Amino acid sequence: MEKIIVLGIGNRLMTDDGIGIYLIEQLSELNCTPHVSFLIGESDIDYCMDQIMKATFVIIVDAVFSGNKPGEITVYPLADLHEYQTLDISAHNFHLFQSLYQQKASIKGFLIGVEPHEISFHIGLSKTLKEKWKTILQNVSQTIDRLIAKN
């Protein structure tokens, strides 16, 4: 049987950088699909890679600088992350996304990036993302469902 994981990464202490964690916490409560696991990886690269390597399909949810309006999402195939040469799209780019690039032949999945409004030392989301929370949650949930169905 296929093992699908949806992995939220980020740092709750850095405002909108924690968006992946907050989304996965709420989405895991709504999950009704037995073969899909919602996991929180925070910024623990070793844990994240261990979980990713055990899965047949991976969806990572993280704050991503894509140039969109705060709260908008962008989907990136994991196999294509090398096209973003310096991988400056995420605060977690150096270790996790470099490791993913090195394992790209054996990892199938996507990165769902949520455009942050603010990354600074503060617990919780920015006011801007809090105001858009329901829309962000709905968009990410629908995107996850669509990506899993296409898998």
Image (cartoon, rainbow, N blue to C red):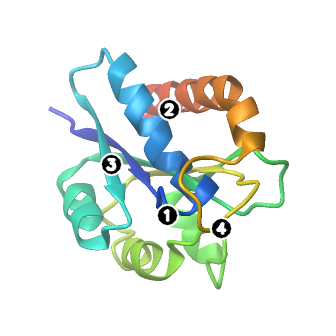
Percent x, y of residue 81: 56, 69
Q: Report the amino acid beneath label 3.
A: Ile
Q: Which residue is mark 2?
A: 144
Mark sitting earlier along the chain (1/4): 1
Mark sitting earlier along the chain (3/4): 3
User: Alpha-carbon distance for marks 3 and 2?
Assistant: 15 Å
User: Alpha-carbon distance for marks 3 and 4?
Assistant: 21 Å
* Dot 1 crowding, Cα within 10 Å, few <14, some 14–19, many 20+: some
Q: Please name the residue shown 65% across and 23% down the image.
A: 134
Residue 144 in view of the camera: yes
Of labels 3 and 2, the one closer to you: 3
Left or right: 96 with respect to 66?
A: left
Q: Nearer the viewer, residue 137 or 89?
A: 137
For mark 1, give the secondary structure.
helix
Q: Report the amino acid beneath label 2.
A: Ile
For mark 4, give the secondary structure.
loop
Give the answer, above or below, for where 95 lies relative to 7.
below
Percent x, y of residue 48: 29, 62
Q: Which residue is mark 4?
A: 120
* Dot 4 crowding, Cα within 10 Å, few <14, some 14–19, many 20+: few
